[in-house]
Amino acid sequence: MATPEKKVKDKVKKILDKLKCYHFMPATGGYGASGVPDIIACHKGKFVAIECKANGNKPTALQQKHLREISIAGGTSLLIDETNIDMLEYYVTGKQTFNYEER
């Protein structure tokens, strides 16, 4: 059974695929750097780093450090969970993707 965070990651990847973004999940857990975002993406030349969380979980201090450094370097760093995943397409493209009155 998929964990709540895995479900968020799967939804994020589906949205990125729809937007035709290049994306991958960096290796961690002893094989890669700790604290790196869950998903690295590129959309029309724009670097996007996405940390996925679920159930109100917060990023660790090391994850926050990486997200902050990416933002300082000019990339987009996002913290996505069940409460804001509907806005991911907007965050990546900068365009409103639905009419609020229809929701």
Image (tube, rainbow, N blue to C red):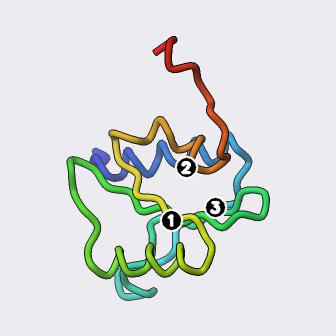
Residue identified by numbered label 2? 13
Corner quadrant of residue 47: bottom right
Q: Disc 2 on helix, strand or loop?
A: helix
Residue type highlighted by circle 2: Lys
Pick the residue in front: 55 or 69. 69
* Residue 24 in view here: no
Q: Gap between marks 2 and 3, in whole Å?
A: 8 Å
Horizontal side, residue 63 vs residue 102: left or right: left
Total label count? 3
Q: Residue furthest top?
A: 102
Horizontal side, residue 20 vs residue 74: left or right: right
* Residue 93 in view here: yes
* Neighbours of disc 3 within 10 Å: few (<14), some (14-19), many (20+): some
Q: Quadrant of the N terminus?
A: top left
Query: In the rendered view, would you say 97 is above or below 59?
Result: above
Pick the residue in front: 24 or 77. 77
Disc on the earlier residue, 2 or 1: 2
Residue identified by numbered label 3? 23
Q: Disc 1 on helix, strand or loop?
A: strand
User: Marks 2 and 3: CB-CB under 8 Å?
Assistant: yes
Residue at horizontal 29 percent and vertical 67 percent from the top: 59
The picture places residue 79, in percent across and down from the top left corner, at 40, 58
Residue at horizontal 35 percent and vertical 74 percent from the top: 64
Residue at horizontal 45 percent and vertical 86 percent from the top: 32
Q: Residue furthest left?
A: 56
Residue type highlighted by circle 3: His
Query: In the rendered view, would you say 76 is above or below 36?
Result: above
* Neighbours of disc 2 within 10 Å: few (<14), some (14-19), many (20+): some
Query: In the rendered view, would you say 28 is above or below 80?
Result: below
Q: Please give the label number shown on residue 77.
A: 1
